[in-house]
Image (tube, rainbow, N blue to C red):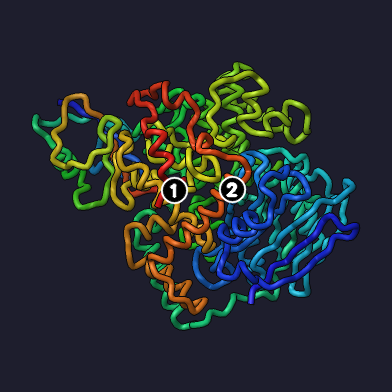
């Protein structure tokens, strides 16, 4: 399956990718979870805000589906 | 011992009186401005009349050596909302006034003629000087004049042409560390009230002042050390805000579908990434500006910055998230240079960027200019400077603009334009917008922290459950923090780190010799909100004023297609504690 990863707030892909705009389509095996994705991105153990298809995600075991948009942020605030 | 300076502008020669804190002892910042306004101002008065008072107060920790303690509050009856108003800003004047032992300055009455005054505050006292040569100078022009006359060791509060014209969107400018008029008490038309008193500028001599001495110097030093460590350790106050500033929010608020776009029609803006904090910081670095800069001495978070134009010359301070949104997504504009120009114009003319962005969005809604037309938006702001009828309409804010052009979709509560979070996609902030005594104000109970950013837990932003309790506790805590002189961003670390919360209490206790506990913080906050609510009730406000505009209840917001779902009877329980 293919999902779109969007990285913000200084987060970067740990591997080379032809797209270079902070938004990357990547291909994953079936049954991939958010936690698997975070490990793949070398972000495990870091505090993150995770948004999946516009919804804030609190469940690292949530299974990703083909076409999902996953946005990742470090802890941030403002206003 | 702190003192209150009262200046009566009704006298032929303005009269200055010094008095003890008296019944206001123990209050600071918002607590003090709201305390004085609620007990001394006739709630039914005209906000621009002689019965209104313009109150300035540094926070409880203002003037001390504590980090982050430079916020300054101004208070009055608001010409924008018709209710009580407290608006606070960073910059240098808060520390400077407090170091001179001043708890509050209260400007009362109104001059009979059209003369303009400046107020000089120094170690040797307070002088009110007539100076009509300052008339209609912009804030930057004024500061250059004052720099020549007084030198660099001053801190200045001022109004631009908008304040002199008494427009309801007028701000009060406070100078920063570089003596630029970039930090503004923006909301509620406080600049119009200062202007109505005939006061153009308050010039505070910073030379020969030193930090106030705590009762327990050793305890204070230790508490300050723990407080700073806590701020530096927390990822938001230690990393996110310094690196990218408040505009780091653009992407996340857009990603969760809560970024008000095209006057609150949609919750996502296609151009969001182009105007985000990440891009802004890159531009600032490339052009020789600075993405990490404090707004006052003693700030360790440094969420501000310096924005240069394409030629590498100073244009404005780093436009903040709310400003970038107001002129950006709200108006369909995705050009940071144009947005930065509007930020500069608002600082220079003395205007609230949120109110102006919302007003221009309403004008776009009316079809007078096209969505995304940045050049026309810039021209409109320049018309305010000139003071022609169109400029004056916009300068009076979103509600006034909507009425002038027959628009029914006007995002205001109590007459004040909504900030940069759509209440249909973040229901908690809708509760704050609706119920805050200040009108639509995100800072009054910043539910975004818990609804989106996961500070202090998590409450689902798309459901009505839990939002009343969240907004209530945040409004209470904020009323207290706004009284300390602390920047509200310290709350991000305090919500997650109990030891940082304790460090703030220890700072206050060691400075004053108090024994304040967490429960006292809650009582302090409630006392302030009660005074403010009481003023508004006496000014004629009912629970019907504690509501969002109707379209938020009936027009679903894409992409989540939600409406605001918190019930009216629940909104009426926010202050039932």
Q: Which residue is mark 2?
A: B317
The disc numbered 1 marks a residue on which chain?
Answer: B
Q: Is residue B296 visible?
A: no
Count the marks: how many? 2
Q: Which residue is mark 1?
A: B575
Report the residue at 69% width, 53% height from top.
B41
Report the residue at 60% width, 59% height from top.
B35
Quarter of the rendering containing residue B232: bottom left
Relative to B251, is B109 on the left or the right?
right
Q: CA distance from mark 2 to mark 1?
A: 37 Å
The disc numbered 2 marks a residue on which chain?
Answer: B
Q: Give the quarter of the figure containing the N terminus of chain B.
A: bottom right
Relative to A17, is B399 on the left or the right?
right
Badge 1: few (under 14), some or many (20 or more) residues near its Cα, within 10 Å? some
Badge 2: few (under 14), some or many (20 or more) residues near its Cα, within 10 Å? many
x and y percent of residue B324 in the render? 52, 37
Query: In the rendered image of this protein, does residue B415 appear above or below residue A49?
Result: above
């Amino acid at each position: 399956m293919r999902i779109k990863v969007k990285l913000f707030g200084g987060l970067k892909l740990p591997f080379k990718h032809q797209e270079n705009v902070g938004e990357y389509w990547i291909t994953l095996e079936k049954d991939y979870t958010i936690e698997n994705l975070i490990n793949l991105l070398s972000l495990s153990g870091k505090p993150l805000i995770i948004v999946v298809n516009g919804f804030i995600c609190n469940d690292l075991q949530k299974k990703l589906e083909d076409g999902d948009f996953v946005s990742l942020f470090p802890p941030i605030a403002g206003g | 011992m702190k003192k209150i300076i009262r200046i009566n502008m009704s006298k032929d020669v303005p009269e200055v009186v010094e008095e003890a804190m008296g019944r206001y002892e123990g209050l600071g910042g918002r607590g003090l401005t709201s305390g004085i306004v609620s007990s001394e101002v006739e709630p039914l008065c005209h906000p621009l009349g002689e019965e209104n008072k313009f109150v300035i107060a540094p926070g409880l920790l203002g003037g001390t050596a504590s980090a982050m303690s430079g916020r300054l509050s101004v208070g009055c009856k608001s010409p924008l909302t018709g209710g009580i108003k407290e608006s606070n800003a960073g910059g240098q004047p808060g520390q400077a006034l407090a170091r001179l032992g001043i708890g509050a300055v209260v400007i009362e009455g109104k001059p009979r003629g059209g003369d303009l005054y400046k107020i000089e505050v120094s170690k040797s006292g307070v002088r009110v000087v007539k100076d009509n040569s300052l008339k209609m100078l912009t804030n930057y022009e004024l500061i250059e004049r004052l720099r020549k006359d007084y030198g660099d060791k001053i801190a200045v509060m001022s109004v631009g042409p908008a304040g002199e014209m008494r427009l309801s969107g007028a701000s009060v400018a406070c100078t920063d560390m570089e003596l630029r008029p970039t930090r503004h008490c923006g909301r509620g038309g406080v600049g119009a009230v200062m202007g109505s008193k005939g006061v153009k500028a308050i010039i505070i001599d910073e030379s020969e002042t030193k930090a106030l001495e705590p009762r327990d110097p050793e305890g204070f030093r230790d508490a300050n050390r723990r407080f700073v460590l806590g701020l530096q350790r927390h990822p938001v106050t230690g990393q996110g805000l310094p690196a990218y500033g408040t505009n780091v929010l653009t992407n996340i608020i857009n990603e969760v579908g809560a970024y008000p776009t095209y006057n609150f029609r949609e919750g996502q803006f296609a151009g969001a990434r182009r105007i985000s904090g990440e891009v802004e910081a890159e531009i600032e670095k490339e052009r020789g500006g600075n993405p990490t800069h404090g707004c006052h001495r003693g700030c360790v978070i440094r969420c501000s910055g310096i924005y240069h134009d394409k030629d590498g010359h100073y244009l404005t301070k780093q436009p903040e998230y709310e400003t970038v949104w107001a002129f950006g997504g709200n108006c369909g504009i995705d050009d940071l240079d144009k947005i930065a120009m509007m930020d500069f114009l608002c600082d220079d003319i003395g205007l609230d960027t949120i109110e102006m962005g919302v007003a221009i969005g309403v004008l776009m809604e009316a079809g007078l200019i096209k969505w995304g037309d940045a050049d026309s938006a810039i021209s409109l702001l320049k018309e305010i400077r000139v003071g022609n009828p169109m400029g004056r309409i916009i300068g009076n804010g979103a509600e006034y603009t909507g009425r002038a052009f027959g628009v029914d979709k006007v995002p205001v509560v109590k007459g004040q334009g909504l900030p940069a979070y759509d209440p249909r996609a973040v229901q908690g902030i809708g509760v704050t917008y609706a119920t805050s005594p200040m009108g639509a104000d995100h800072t009054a109970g910043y539910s975004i922290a818990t609804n989106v950013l996961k500070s202090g837990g998590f409450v689902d932003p798309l459901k009505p459950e839990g939002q009343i309790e969240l907004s209530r506790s945040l409004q209470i805590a904020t009323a207290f923090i706004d009284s300390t002189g602390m920047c509200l961003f310290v709350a991000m670390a305090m919500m997650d780190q109990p030891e940082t919360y304790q460090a703030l209490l220890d700072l206050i206790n060691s400075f004053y010799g108090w024994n304040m506990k967490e429960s006292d913080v809650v009582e302090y906050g409630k006392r302030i909100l009660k005074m403010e609510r009481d003023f508004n009730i006496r000014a004629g406000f009912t629970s019907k004023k504690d509501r969002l505009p109707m379209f938020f209840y009936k027009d679903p917001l894409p992409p989540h297609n939600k409406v605001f779902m918190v019930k009216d009877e629940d909104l009426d329980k926010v202050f039932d504690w």
